[in-house]
């Protein structure tokens, strides 16, 4: 019985599809269509101007690093010393350096001499701006990719880190 149902279903589908195939064989109609003569197009040279709103997105054609002045990055700087004037804190001076002190596997100490920078409040070196100088540390603003973060730098130890 199921063979009979399958065969009859297949025959019904074939009879429905067969006229569509024959209809596709008919020649196209011979109606004529008029084609308009091509007109000469005017060429206009317009320069595109792009502008980017600064309040939502940054301009993709500007460099990501805000400070083009060069100089060392925050990760390279260490606080070497602080000359703190208690009576006049605005006259205080901090020494930042790029020197590194490393302890080797055999226990020996290697010092890599770098550059030193003497800074006061408000001065900028690389991406670091000094905000406040205390007796044992300094507060700095670090700008990276348009975002400013505040960090505290303390004098480095023999292990080479800020503590």
Image (spheres, grey):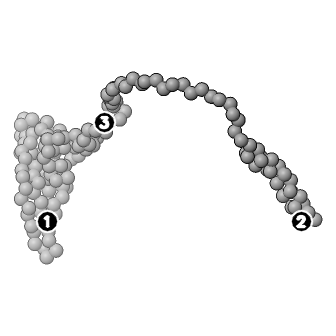
Circle 3 sits on which residue? 59
Can you give x and y, in whole percent of width and height, for residue 137 in the image? 15, 47
Q: Does residue 6 appear left or right of residue 51 in this picture?
A: right
Q: Residue at x 15, y 60 (%)?
A: 160
Disc with the residue nearer the chain's start (1 vs 2): 2
Q: Position of residue 107 (x, y in %)?
A: 13, 74
Q: Secondary structure at mark 2?
A: helix
Residue 158 place in picture, x, y as percent:
13, 63
User: Is 51 drawn above or below residue 127 in the view shown?
Assistant: above
The residue wearing badge 1 is 102
Residue 36 position, x and y percent, is 54, 25
Q: CA distance from mark 1 to mark 2?
A: 88 Å
Question: Element under label 1?
Answer: strand
- Split into 4 quadrants, where in the image is the N terminus? bottom right
Mark 1 or 2: in front is 2
User: Between marks 1 and 3, how big is the CA–CA gap?
Assistant: 41 Å
Residue 122 appears in which quarter of the rendering? top left
């Amino acid at each position: 019985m199921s063979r009979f149902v399958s065969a009859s279903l297949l025959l019904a589908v074939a009879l429905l599809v067969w006229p569509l195939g024959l209809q596709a064989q008919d020649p196209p109609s011979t109606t004529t269509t008029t084609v308009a003569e091509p007109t000469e197009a005017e060429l206009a040279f317009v320069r595109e101007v792009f502008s980017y709103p600064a309040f939502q997105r940054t301009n993709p054609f500007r460099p990501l690093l805000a400070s083009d002045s060069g100089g060392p990055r925050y990760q390279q700087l260490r606080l070497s010393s602080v000359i703190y004037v208690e009576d006049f804190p605005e006259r205080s001076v901090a020494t930042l350096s790029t020197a590194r002190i490393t302890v080797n596997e055999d226990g020996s100490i290697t010092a890599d001499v770098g550059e030193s920078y003497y800074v006061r409040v408000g001065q900028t070196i690389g991406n670091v701006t000094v905000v406040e100088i205390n007796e044992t540390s300094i507060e700095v603003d670090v700008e990276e990719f348009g975002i400013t973060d505040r960090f505290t730098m303390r004098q480095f130890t023999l292990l080479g880190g800020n503590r």
